[in-house]
Structure formats: structure tokens, C-alpha cells
Amino acid sequence: RERERERERERERERERERERERERERERTIALAPEEDLGAFSEVILAQDRLSGRMYAVKCIPKKALKGKESSIENEIAVLRRIKHENIVALEDIYESPDHLYLIMQLVSGGELFDRIVEKGFYTEKDASTLIRQVLDAVSYLHQMGIVHRDLKPENLLYFNPLDESKIMISDFGLSKMEGSGDVMSTACGTPGYVAPEVLAQKPYSKAVDCWSIGVIAYILLCGYPPFYDENDSKLFEQILKADYEFDAPYWDDISDSAKDFISSLMEKEPTLRFTCEQALRHPWIAGDTALSKNIHESVSRQIKKNFAKSKWRQAFNATAVVRHMRRLQLGSSMDGGGRRGTRPQGPLTPDPAGDQLGGHRAVRGERERGR
């Protein structure tokens, strides 16, 4: 009887060894081909191919030694990605682990970044922008229904699925996403300053409404090529956001429909309880109707994008706690200096300034341009 139990244990050990060999064979099915680009502060993405099917993937490679102190961030991203499946969201296909690295096998999107594609176009209209924003709203509405808040929506997290003109848009990067709790309220300050909602900067509890604000900011940029909030002085930049102090400046907005402006204003509403939800935004005539204009605005929008958004700035990593630390240093709030002129529109390529590097995103301004009247 004892010998029989020992034989059974040996058979189980052999089965486990075979399972491990199978897992190893499965890992070997995917091979890295070439580095693609840096991604974030502690990982990179490489192009990979499944040897059996020939299918291509993007593999996010994360050195384990770089995860020290950041474990919760990657664990959160994996937890979020495992839950979601939507045609406009980059999918997590699988996860592999080696002694030194963690590999996230991601759906490959090959169409390039949002701003690059707009600049490359020869023809671009409000209708094009409306179609883009509708896809983003569909995806974010799905996330919200799943109890997930993205918390870092911005143009560089929007990628085209393929190089075709009719390609769909995809949302990527869920490192700062959060699953809502029972109270549906969060308080951790995170995001990229130029796109973050006033309640986050004010360090107030917030909800999924922060994503809707960010979509409004993205829509604003898609129609003019520059950000709604801008100033060389950080405290004044944050003050503008806190007050929802933005304008539809002439001449850049002269050819944009009132419906588009109303849509943006409904999303960039300072009071979260009055702000449009994704569902409300999807029903707005600029999205669901035919109020988006077909006039070609490519020349003006692409010119402003090239002036105001430089790729070196897009690549900057963002420390999720930097905003709060920076705000405390600047003593925002009652001690905020209300004086000084409002910043001018940025001109020329952005260059990272030491004070702003950690903040990332599209916030820096350098140079001046006379504002149109």
C-alpha cells in the first residue's frame, strides 16, 4: 500500500513536470523580434511573433528589479486589463514570467499615434473629430459600466489600430486606472495636469466624471490643435484648471460649430455633478446627430498641433504623485497669486523644462504668439 502511494506521488510529480514543460513550450512560441519604443519609466515594448500562427504582438517587458516599490501599479494594470474586452481598448492577450522579467503580451496596434495621423492627413473635419470622440466615449462608457475609471485619458494614450484611413481608435495604458469601490468615490491624485479634472487638482474626492472631463479636453484639442489651459507659470496653469477658465479663441474657433462648443462645454463643466456622463455625451447632437461640420480644418489644426505638441514631450514618464507635491510647493489655494497676465499660446516645439519633467503631458509652454482677434 505504501509503495502504491509512492508510485502515485511519483506519477503526480511527473505530471507536474510535464505541465511545466508544456508551459515552457508555450512560452517559446513567442519570440522577441526588435525593440519598438520606450514605454513609461520602468518598462519597454518589443515586437513579437507567435511562431505557430505568425500573429504579431506587442510585448511589454518589465524588469522585476525595476518593480520594487511599483508592484501595485503593474498589479493594478493587469487586474484592470484582465477584466475588459472592447473593440476600442488594447487587449491583454497573455502574461509570461521569467526569473528576471514580467511579460505582458498585448494586442498589437500599428496605426500610430493620434496627433501623427491628424498631421499626416490632407483632409480633416469636425466629423472626423466627432467619430474619434464617439469611439472614445463608447470605450470609456464600457469601462464605467464595468466599474473602472481610467484616470489618465490623453491623446498619447489613443492609438490607431492599423494604418488604414478608416482605422478605429484604441485606448491604451491602464497603469493609473482604478476599479471603483462601493462608494464610487476616489481621492488619490493622479493623471496628467493638462487633462486632469478640477476636483482632482483640488484634492477632493472624485468619481468617473474625471474621465469625462479629460474627453472634453481631448475634443477641444482635436478641433483647434492647442490645449485649453496654458501658462508658463504652474500655479496659474493649475488656477485656470481649478476655475475651468478656458475660451474658444478667435480666429481658431471661428469655423467650429456651436454644437461642438456646446458638447465640449458640457464635458468641461467644473461641477462634476453637472458634467455630462459618457451616456449623455453619446446622445449629444454633435456625436449622435449631424451637427458636426464637414469643412476642412486640417491646415489650421495640424499647424497648431505641430507647434504645441512635440514628441519628446509625449514620451515623458509621469509620476502620479508629482501634481500634489508640486501644488503643495506652490501653495495653491488661499495663498495663490491671482496677478499676472494670462499665458500666450505656445510657439515652436516644446522643450522639457526641469521643473516640469515629472509632470509630463502637454502642459509646458515656451515662446509667444500674438493671439488672434
Image (cartoon, rainbow, N blue to C red):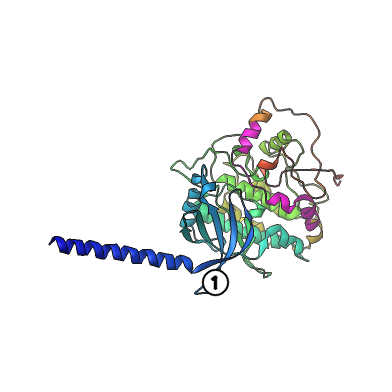
Q: How many marks?
A: 1
Q: Nearer the viewer, residue 333 or 372?
A: 333
Q: Main secondary structure of the magenta part?
A: helix
Name which residue lies at 51% across and 44% down: 68
Could you tell me which secondary element the residue under label 1 belongs to? loop
Residue 260 lies, with reference to residue 58, above or below; the image says above
Can residue 332 be seen here? The reply is no
Which residue is label 1 attached to? Answer: 55
Q: Nearer the viewer, residue 302 or 199?
A: 302
Provide residue 248's location: percent of width, then percent of height. Answer: 76, 47
Residue 313, magenta (yes or no):
yes
Provide residue 299's location: percent of width, then percent of height. Answer: 81, 60
State which quadrant residue 13 falls in. bottom left
Provide residue 201's location: percent of width, then percent of height. Answer: 62, 37
Kind of residue at disc 1: Arg
Q: Is residue 301 left or right of residue 173?
A: right
Q: Quadrant of the N terminus?
A: bottom left
Q: Which residues are magenta?
A: 301-327
State which quadrant residue 270 falls in. top right
Q: Is residue 2 left or right of residue 342?
A: left
State the residue lying farthest toward the front: 3
